[in-house]
């Protein structure tokens, strides 16, 4: 029986991570949300594995049982980075968590989330934040079962964004 | 007449920044949530690998006026990452003292963050990997959060060109904290 391990991503995993990013994006209704500028694949390596990484990543890897011929394969990932709260100090933000559909229901997503929390606590973080789409009941149920609060519902926080032309105009470009 | 300048915060500004952080929390009716100390702000913002960056709005007195410069607003931000768009900037806090509002100081801070983040994104990229200099790798998104009843702030951000992603796309902000986070991390 195959065994799943959650480990830190290596630079060589970027191809697999990008494959999973695209699968996750494909699940989001508006495909225009996902604009694949060619450099993103190049940027993933530079931004994650340079001297001062912009993000950190865990991957869920299936290791075949002894005797099985197939090599290890990456079936899920969690991408996170450290942020800052002027109320609480260091926090962690889980940008993406994804498990391929055929590997769901085995607790892999929960394992990834728990590993991120463990790493974050070791780094002195006091909050673990993430965002989820309101229709994504499966994810909402999982996060609530694990103890998260919906701050949009409870406190009324809304996520705003400047992008494209609006951002260039704002930055005087 | 006094002149306002927006400049990068220095370590010595942390006392003033904490004062304004408390005022913002009070405005957001969430004062009891402020647990941070001045020491943590100094260590986390001015060490070797800062967790955040900060701009302050400083009133410089006119020539002849006796009062020294004073900090009347701030904008605290950091770099984040989108797996769709790459490097982004997140404005955690922006605040201007009530008696100094209505003069465009908040807008100046927000615009300065946008300007700095685009330049910084490109500079950091160039330092790390020269072969990517040709790619425009500055920050492509500027994100922030606002409370749904804060009409003044919402009107400002929309006037400056922001979109409410919670309303338009249905994003909700979730958070693990305290006991829930410790349990999650197996501590």
Image: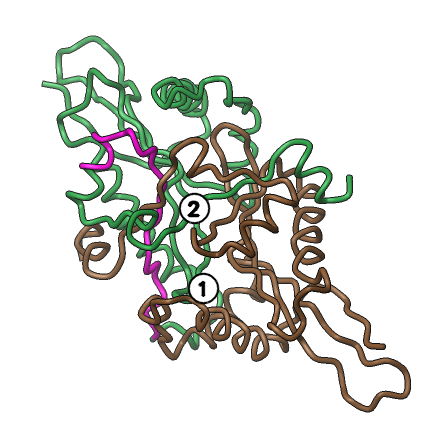
Chain colours: A brown, B green
Asked whether the residues under the numbered discs 2 and 1 touch, taking CB atoms below 8 Å apart as contact, a structural biologist would say no
Between the C-alphas of marks 2 and 1, the distance is: 36 Å
Residue named by callout 2: B172
Mark 1 lies on residue: B127
- Relative height, residue B66 to residue A22 (above, below): above
Q: Nearer the viewer, residue B45 or A83?
A: A83
Point out the residue furthest to the left here.
Answer: B1
Considering depth in this image, is A28 or A73 the residue closer to the camera?
A: A28
Q: Along the horizontal axis of the image, is A107 left or right of B154?
A: right
Q: Chain of mark 1?
A: B
Q: Which residues are magenta?
A: B135-155
In the rendered image, residue B36, in percent from the top left (x then y), is placed at 54, 24
Q: Is residue B146 magenta?
A: yes
Q: Residue at x 26, y 41 (%)?
A: B110
| Dot 2 crowding, Cα within 10 Å, few <14, some 14–19, many 20+ | many
Quarter holding the C terminus of chain A?
A: bottom left
Residue B1: x and y in percent read 9, 18
User: Measured along the vertical axis of the image, is residue B143 above or below residue B32?
Assistant: below
- Residue A119, given in percent of the width and then of the height, sits at 69, 49
SS of the residue under disc 1: helix
Q: Earlier in the sequence, mark 2 or mark 1?
A: 1
């Amino acid at each position: 029986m195959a065994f799943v391990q959650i480990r830190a991503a290596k630079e060589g995993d970027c191809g697999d991570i990008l494959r999973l990013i695209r699968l996750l994006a494909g699940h989001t209704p508006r495909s225009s949300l996902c604009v694949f500028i060619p450099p993103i694949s190049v940027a993933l390596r530079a931004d994650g594995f340079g001297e001062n990484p912009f993000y950190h990543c865990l991957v869920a890897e299936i290791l075949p049982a002894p005797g099985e011929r197939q090599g290890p394969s990456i079936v899920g990932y969690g991408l996170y980075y450290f942020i800052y709260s002027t109320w609480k100090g260091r926090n962690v933000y889980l940008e993406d968590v994804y498990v391929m559909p055929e590997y769901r229901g085995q607790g892999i997503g929960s394992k990834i989330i728990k590993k991120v929390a463990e790493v974050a606590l070791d780094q002195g973080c006091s909050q673990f934040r993430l965002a989820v789409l309101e229709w994504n009941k499966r994810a909402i149920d999982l996060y609530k079962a694990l103890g998260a609060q919906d701050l949009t519902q409870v406190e009324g926080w809304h996520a705003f964004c400047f992008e494209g032309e609006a951002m260039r105009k704002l930055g005087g470009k």
